[in-house]
Image (spheres, rainbow, N blue to C red):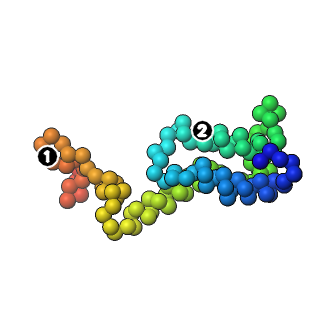
Amino acid sequence: MKSTEFSTAIKRKVFNTCILPCLTYGCETWSLTKHHRDMLSYCQRAMGRSMMSIRKQDKIKYTTIRSKTQVTDILTKLDQLKWRWTGHTLRNNQEKWSKIVTDWYQETEKGKEEGNTEDGKTS
């Protein structure tokens, strides 16, 4: 990514096809906190600076770097993958653990389930 022999277009393709899938592998099931999202965003900004051979001390805004590199935003990609996986689990008719956990209600001390009742009212 730091090599000056390759154009920005080639670096962008490498990032979007190799690095981004590695960073987001399995993200559909991650419970991302703000800290994790910030760290992934920080990683992408560092790689963007590396692609353009820009140091942090140059104090160039990331929006400027991003407009030059035109790489896919990692947070947008994460959200797309999570929504895609959610759609797959909701459309699945089989009783898999992911669907069971999604529809799970905690039992109270009296043995009744908390959550919605059959008539649609909340207990």
Name, please, the residue furthest toward the left: 110
| Left or right of 110 on screen, residue 58 | right
Query: CA gap, disc 2 to disc 1?
Result: 42 Å
Q: Nearer the viewer, residue 22 or 117?
A: 22
Secondary element under disc 1, as helix, strand or loop, is loop
In x, y percent, where is residue 84? 50, 61
Number of marks in the rendered image: 2
Q: Is residue 89 above or below residue 28?
A: below
Which quadrant holds residue 117? bottom left
Q: Residues within 10 Å of mark 1 (few under 14, many from 20)?
A: few
Which quadrant holds residue 77? bottom right
Q: Earlier in the sequence, mark 2 or mark 1?
A: 2
Residue under the point 86% across and 48% down: 4
Nearest to the eye among marks 2 and 1: give it. 2
In x, y percent, where is residue 102? 34, 54
In x, y percent, where is residue 36? 54, 39
Q: Amino acid at mark 2?
A: Met
Residue 58 visible to the viewer? yes
Secondary element under disc 2, as helix, strand or loop, is helix
- The residue identified by callout 2 is 39
Q: Residues within 10 Å of mark 2 (few under 14, many from 20)?
A: few
Q: Amino acid at mark 1?
A: Gly
Residue 63 visible to the viewer? no
- The residue identified by callout 1 is 111
Residue under the point 70% across and 42% down: 45
Q: Nearer the viewer, residue 7 or 61?
A: 7
| Left or right of 94 on screen, residue 47 | right
Name, please, the residue furthest toward the top: 57
Residue under the point 67% across and 58% down: 17
Residue under the point 60% across and 42% down: 40
